[in-house]
Amino acid sequence: MITVGHILEKKNSNVFTIKRDDSVQAALEIMAREKISSLPVVDDQGQLIGIISERDYIRKAVPERKAPWDVKVNDLMTENVLTVKQSDLLQECMKIMTSNRIRHLPVMNDDSLLGILSISDVVSALRSARFIFD
Amino acid sequence: MSTVREIVNGRDRQLHSISPDTTVQAAIQIMSSELISALPVMESNKLVGIISERDYVRKIAAQKIPAWSVKINEIMTKDVITIDIDTPIEECMKLMTTNRIRHLPVMDNDELKTVISITDVVSVLRLDEN
């Protein structure tokens, strides 16, 4: 049985974050530089309060023709973040990602953010597992 | 063995595409309104590229370049990795993870049929715990 913890072990342990008062431009620049597609949003105590993705900018700000430097992370982030724990199974992550059509899940240990599990991480893990088709 | 055809058959989604001479702004407007993350770029009914949310963020937005000042052919991925409709899904997973891509145009007899996403792939998989 593959758990979130197993997958996270194989990942780079750096977790990049952003604050709600930062500009979306700053968030996009971090994503571009680090080649990631979403960023967890944390408060001054480092607690997870949201998540912002490439897609949030495109779907929420582009139709209104808002430039990324004119929008704050707070305005576009998703606040009710779905998260997983290290002990959660890969199947559970697949279900959460496909039924909610999301590609990133923050991994939590109680209140602390351990990392982000992406749908690409899930597919990489699946390649070494046995699976059947629906 | 399950193939890409199972993913394609299980859905009814219109194929959106765009021309390489159009502005990036037009591409992201379509992606935004149609809730899609990548658009195939077509010229004379031939697939000549693909443009994604990620291309836009990394090559345009993060560089503070206005999207209406750039044409799609300036930032699109030209060497598009495609997949034949009868290819096993395992091969699809391999192409996506080794190339770090989330979308694959699906070809049927050299004709673009649709674009499948990494979420579409995960949706048809179920782990076998036995």
Image (spheres, helix red, strand yellow):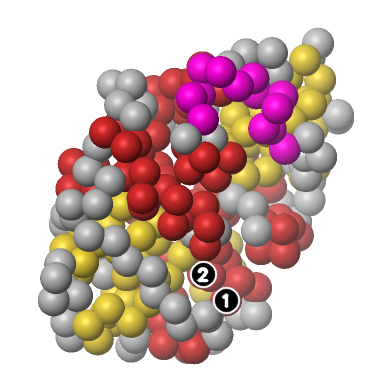
The numbered mark at residue A79 is none
Q: Is residue A81 left or right of residue B61?
A: left
Category of crowding for the residue at label 1, using alpha-carbon neighbours closer than 10 angstroms: few (below 14), some (14–19), many (at least 20) = some
Q: Position of residue A21 (x, y in %)?
A: 18, 52
For the magenta stretch, what is the residue range? B65-77
Q: Are marks 2 and 1 on the same chain?
A: yes
Task: Say if residue B113 shows up in the picture.
Answer: no
Asked whether the residues under the numbered discs 2 and 1 touch, taking CB atoms below 8 Å apart as contact, a structural biologist would say yes
Task: Determine which residue is flagged by label 2.
Answer: A122
Amino acid at dot 1: Ala
Indicate the chain on which mark 2 is placed: A
Q: Position of residue B4 (x, y in %)?
A: 69, 47
Q: Quadrant of residue B113?
A: top right
Q: Position of residue A38 (x, y in %)?
A: 40, 56
Indicate the chain on which mark 1 is placed: A
| Looking at the image, residue A118 lies above or below residue A101 | below
Category of crowding for the residue at label 2, using alpha-carbon neighbours closer than 10 angstroms: few (below 14), some (14–19), many (at least 20) = many
- In the picture as drawn, the residue positioned furthest to the right comes out as B109
Residue B75 belongs to magenta span: yes
| Looking at the image, residue A85 lies above or below residue A19 | below
Q: Is residue A7 left or right of residue A130?
A: left
What residue is at 42 percent from the left and 48 percent from the top?
Answer: A28
What residue is at 32 percent from the left and 76 percent from the top?
Answer: A107
Amino acid at dot 2: Val
The numbered mark at residue A125 is 1
Q: Position of residue A90 (x, y in %)?
A: 44, 76
Q: Secondary structure at mark 1?
A: helix
Q: Nearer the viewer, residue B109 or A80?
A: A80
What residue is at 52 percent from the left and 40 percent from the top?
Answer: B63
What residue is at 53 percent from the left and 48 percent from the top?
Answer: B120
Task: Say if residue B127 shows up in the picture.
Answer: yes
Q: CA distance from mark 2 to mark 1?
A: 5 Å
